[in-house]
């Protein structure tokens, strides 16, 4: 296990995934019913953008930093919510010397900030050092259960949740050659146990055919697929395209992302694609 999310925190892939995550949380938590959240591949929870790892790649400069530099008036509602969550996390550490964003929240931080006392949250991180960082990030916080375990196994064990309402974020590092197979198996197992759960599944697009074949395996009637492709040269060996498939999205999620996605693509310099299932209501103009 060599992957460390610290190298990539706040990059274009995080922007897509975390904007969608914040919107899912916003919509799911607008109902007055308990929610269970499982983050199967959690990372360390929070990232220092001036730290060794993030500085080495500087990926946040072409991601979150570009969004922050836009005039607030034109931002779509989902982006406003995402940027507010990012700023709230950064503020906890006080002003940075350069005045820019210094700390970036990973998925566990974004989830934790949104949850109510009645909700339940499990975050899994298998890498020993990152799991320790995650525990430290949430030391003394009883609203999150951190597990140093295989997130795929925990998914199988924890579904269906007692709450009967749930969000599962699956965001693997794609180091294993068979990660697409593991991912589709996990989604199948999840849906078999908990058919009404909401699943957000991130995937890289390095090989278009492989990514399309993976998406085709997600045979859920209610499925929304969002993809973002950067147009410039991302740099030798760097990821330039990724997707997020959301199964059983809450009402109004498609509408929110149809507004946010083309805007994000234009700010980051790329193209976005939003593919809704034929059974769902037609989305407003959504292609960038
Ligand atoms: C892409 S990163 C997660 C980023 C995080 N979800 C976020 O959005 O901030 C993937 C993480 O999964 C961890 N990991 C790899 N295999 C795992 C497994 N089987 N179960 C749980 N965590 C795993 C890696 O160590 C890495 O920290």
Image (tube, helix red, strand yellow):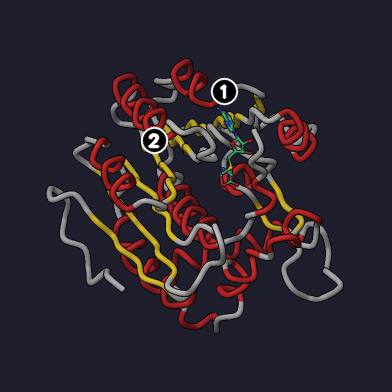
Q: Please tell me whether mark 1 sits on a helix, a strand or a loop.
A: loop
Regarding ligand 1, which quadrant of the image does it lie in?
A: top right
- Residue at image point 28% right, 49% down: 209
* Front residue (pair 119, 73): 73
Neighbor class of circle 1 (other Cα within 10 Å; few <14, some 14-19, many 20+) is some
Q: Are marks 1 and 2 in contact (CB under 8 Å)?
A: no
The answer, for residue 215, to whether it is visible in the render is yes
Image spot of residue 140 (x, y percent) = 79, 32
What distance separates the C-alpha of mark 1 from that of mark 2? 16 Å
Q: Circle 1 sits on which residue?
A: 150
Q: Is residue 238 above or below residue 287?
A: above
Residue at image location 51% in from the left, 32% down from the top:
38
Relative to 198, 75 lies left or right: right
Q: Position of residue 113 (x, y in %)?
A: 62, 47
Circle 2 is placed at which residue position? 180
Q: Residue at x 46, y 33 (%)?
A: 177
Relative to 118, is 57 on the left or the right?
Answer: right
The answer to which of 130 and 116 lies nearer the viewer is 130
> Who is closer to the viewer here, 43 or 191?
43
Which residue lies most toward the top here? 157
Q: Is mark 1 within 8 Å of ligand 1?
A: yes
Answer with the quarter of the image where residue 116 lies: top right
Q: Position of residue 22 (x, y in %)?
A: 50, 53
Instruction: Give the quadrant of the C terminus.
Output: bottom left
Q: Position of residue 211 (x, y in %)?
A: 33, 47
Question: In screen coordinates, is 252 left or right of 125?
Answer: left
| Of the image marks 1 and 2, the number of the one nearer the N terminus | 1
Which one is closest to the eye, mark 1 or mark 2? 2
């Amino acid at each position: 296990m060599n992957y460390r999310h610290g190298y990539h925190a706040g990059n274009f892939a995080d922007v897509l995934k975390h904007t969608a995550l914040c919107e899912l949380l916003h919509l799911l938590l607008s109902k007055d019913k308990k929610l269970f959240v499982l983050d199967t591949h959690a990372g360390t929870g929070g990232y220092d953008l001036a730290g060794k790892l993030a500085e080495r790649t500087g990926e946040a400069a072409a991601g979150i930093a570009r969004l922050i530099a836009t005039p607030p008036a034109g931002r779509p509602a989902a982006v406003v919510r995402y940027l507010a969550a990012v700023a709230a996390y950064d503020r906890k550490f006080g002003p940075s010397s350069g005045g820019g964003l210094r700390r970036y929240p990973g998925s566990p931080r974004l989830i934790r900030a949104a949850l109510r006392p009645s909700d339940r949250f499990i975050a899994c991180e298998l890498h020993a050092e990152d799991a320790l960082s995650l525990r430290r990030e949430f030391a003394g916080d009883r609203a999150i259960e951190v597990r140093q375990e295989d997130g795929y196994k925990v998914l199988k064990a924890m579904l269906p949740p007692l709450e009967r309402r749930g969000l599962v974020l699956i965001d693997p590092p794609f180091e294993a050659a068979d990660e697409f197979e593991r991912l589709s198996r996990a989604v199948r197992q999840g849906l078999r146990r908990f058919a009404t759960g909401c699943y957000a599944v991130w995937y890289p697009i390095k090989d278009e055919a492989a990514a399309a074949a993976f998406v085709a395996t997600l045979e859920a009637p209610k499925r929304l697929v969002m993809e973002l492709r950067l147009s410039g040269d991302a740099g030798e060996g760097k990821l330039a395209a990724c997707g997020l498939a959301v199964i059983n999205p809450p009402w109004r999620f498609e509408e929110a992302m149809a507004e946010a996605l083309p805007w994000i693509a234009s700010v980051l310099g790329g193209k976005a694609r939003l593919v809704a299932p034929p059974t769902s209501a037609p989305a407003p103009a959504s292609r960038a």
